[in-house]
Amino acid sequence: MTAPTDAILLGYGGSAHSKIALAWADDLAARLSRPLHVLVSALHVPDVPNVPKEHQMGHVTDELNRLLASAKAPSTSVTTVLTSPGEALVGAADKAHLTVLGARTQGPLKSMVNGSVSQYVTRHAPGPVVVVREPNTARTGRIIVGIDGSEHSLKALEFALRHAKDTSGHVRALHVRQHHDDKTDEKVEQVLARAFEANGGMRVDVEHVLGSAPEKLAEASSEADLLVIGTRGRSAISALLLGSVTQSVLQHSQCPVAVVR
């Protein structure tokens, strides 16, 4: 089955982390009145001689269908594939509203989102990708977005504002710098002004802090519902999708992380 257009696309692996991601994706699909489409890959199912992989993962899909029976999304659908989960998700993401992954999986399908898959999807998916972990606190409505004055941080801010509007949240823009730079501050103000104008004057709380971007963003995530980062930037945030920095943010964030390109 092909993923419905503008659906919330979820990569599911059968673990507890996948179930947290499923609940998050289902809640968002209900709030946005969008379909929820779940992709399950059999690639990491342990081999059983003479048994097709689609049969080996039957217990996972059976449980998933039971969970979807009580879903809040207006409609749900499931696709099972025998190919790489990363490639399958990136291919299906072309028509999705956004793609959702669990922070890690260790269940029957082992690795729908291990390090390599999450890196692959966040690097190559054409749209926003949300990597879900259970928030550190009860829902606050706060959405943190990292900005640095670049076009990529503008896209991240615009995504954060749209998400806030859809979920009745509020946005706090965090500008992390290693030293004071008037030119950078000016570009940050320009990004804020453009986002403000493009989004009907929605309010954005802004904080300027000194330090390491991954550390400050992870710290701010402790009281947030969502942390939003752009794929590239002009300062420390520029490396957010280039290996260790991305992994640091994804590993240490205390709430779901949206990666926006």
Image (cartoon, rainbow, N blue to C red):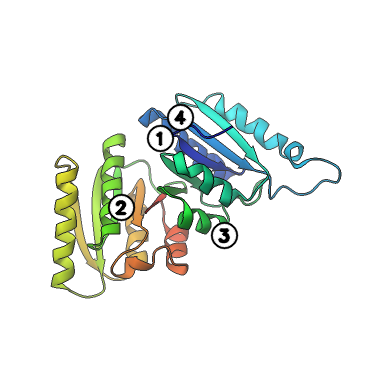
At which x and y percent is residue 77? 55, 29
Compared to 207, does 68 lie above or below? above
**Residue beneath the point at 44% across and 67% down:** 242
Q: Is residue 149 left or right of residue 105?
A: left
**Amino acid marked by disc 1:** Leu
Labels 4 & 3 near each other (Cβ < 8 A): no
Q: Amino acid at mark 3?
A: Ser
Q: Is residue 14 visible?
A: no
Amino acid type of the residue tagged 2 in the rendering: Ala
Do labels 2 and 3 touch, CB within 8 Å?
no
In this view of the protein, which residue sits in the foreground, 261 or 174?
261
The amino acid marked with disc number 4 is Pro
Q: Which numbered marker is on residue 28? A: 1
Residue 133 relative to residue 197: left or right: right
- Disc marking residue 156: 2
Q: Is residue 99 left or right of residue 40?
A: left
